[in-house]
Amino acid sequence: MAKLKTKFACTECGTESPKWLGKCPGCGQWNTMVEEKETVVKTQGMGSPLIQTKEKPRPIIHIESGQEKRIETTNQELNRVLGGGVVPGSLILVGGDPGIGKSTLLLQTSHALASKNLTVLYISGEESVRQTRLRADRLGALTDKLYVLCETNMEQINDAIESVQPDFLVIDSIQTVYDPNVQSAPGSVSQVRECTAHFMRVAKIKGIATVLVGHVTKEGAIAGPRMLEHMVDCVLYFEGERHHTYRLLRAVKNRFGSTNEIGIFEMGEEGLREVNNPSELFLSERPLGVSGSTVVAAMEGTRPVLVELQALVATTNFPSPRRMATGIDHNRMTLIVAVLEKRMGMFLQTQDAYLNVAGGIRLDEPAVDLAAAVSIASSFRDAPTRPYDVFFGEIGLTGEVRGVSRAEQRVREAQKLGFKRVIMPSKSLKGWTPPKGIEIIGVETVAQALSIAFA
């Protein structure tokens, strides 16, 4: 007979414990251990596997190789993030803040695939079919190949999959789906784990490209056990400010492509619209002739992006000045301030320093160091740089400017947007021919870069 076993699981990280604990030993959060009941079935021997397979182990050299087939959507930004399109049989997890546009993106994608004569099944556990129809009317996503179902029971969802036989499946969201054989509430760690494992088996066996929508915690991570992200093939985060029109789709895990790509969208009345030139979007509100403002040529995956860096240095009356960075690593900013103090003689010990990446994008590569140093020096001296200068380069602790990758693509992006001069590491000038119509200056040290920038 089956018997019920009680355990306690953390709602943040999924750590399990036989008894209740006030503080989770896994993630350190308080009051996150909730009681769950699971059914334990006694079996003879070692038990039987969940999936029976007739395949036998083969030498890897005898396995057929080649590129996996992909289904391209009409959204080129989404194709870029996924690595070229949707792979049949893949399991994709999409997370993001409430109201950011996850359901809108997936409904538009479902319509695009259904327009290519593919069968799409959209299962919503949070909205009724009438609400989904209203959103489809607004987005213009109406086609007879798009099937919609409002259901949270796993058994009913299996029946719908068997009857429709879709090529593309959307579960919105995984936290609302429950398995009646698991004795715990929907959204619990056990339910999310079991339901995700079931959809993974369905995707792999039937070759259905499946997208799961996941809720996020207040810290921004996907809710549920951490193993949820290990089970899926691709993890996408939909980012952006709810009060702004642009959205960023970032891949943090992708077994079929790069994890450095981002897709940029703009939210409008008719849904999400892809942005083909993100540099122009990020520089559209840039002020000219203002101290503390510079432009950096950054790389997001294989795409060069020009972004404005803003710095503000102000005198403080407190003994310890503040160092605050938005869109860039705080520790990196502290390092740059220390280099300016030690190597350039700037007295920043009594100054608050604030650094902001305009547009809401986050820059993690070290190539933004030189632009950040010029922005801080410009605000400290209250001297603006030339409005059509672009900076990029990595800064070392001795004040040298180190070379970075993909310098040619950064320079060509700056030339395309009408910039006149690029200040970059001299080591990155080797191996390619600079384009005509733009002045390129190679520098060795931060002191040399600042003397050229403020000349």
Image (cartoon, rainbow, N blue to C red):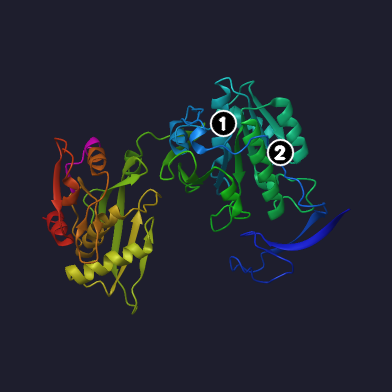
Identify the magenta region.
415-423
Q: Can residue 422 be seen in this view?
A: no
Q: 111 or 162, which lies in front?
A: 162
Q: Quadrant of residue 19?
A: bottom right
> Residue 66, labelled with which disc?
none
| Distance between the alpha carbons at the discs numbered 1 and 2 | 21 Å
At a point 57% along the width and 58% down the height, the residue shown is: 218
Query: SS of the residue at dot 2?
Result: loop
Dot 1 crowding, Cα within 10 Å, few <14, some 14–19, many 20+: some
Q: Mark 1 or mark 2, which is nearer to you?
A: 2
Q: Where is residue 133 in the image (x, y as percent from the top left)?
A: 65, 30
Residue 411 highlighted magenta (yes or no): no
At a point 73% along the width and 50% down the height, the residue shown is: 186
Marked residue nearer the N-terminal end (1 or 2):
2
User: Which amino acid type is shown beneath numbered disc 2?
Assistant: Gln
At a point 60% along the width and 43% down the height, the residue shown is: 213
Q: Position of residue 418 (x, y in %)?
A: 21, 37
Q: In the image, is 21 to the left or to the right of 433? A: right
Q: Is residue 84 visible?
A: yes
Residue 417 highlighted magenta (yes or no): yes
What residue did someone put label 2 on? 52
Q: Do the residues labelled 1 and 2 touch (CB within 8 Å)?
A: no
Q: Position of residue 167 (x, y in %)?
A: 61, 27
Q: 169 or 241, which lies in front?
A: 169
Location of residue 143 with respect to 293 vertically, above or below: above
What residue did someone put label 1 on? 88
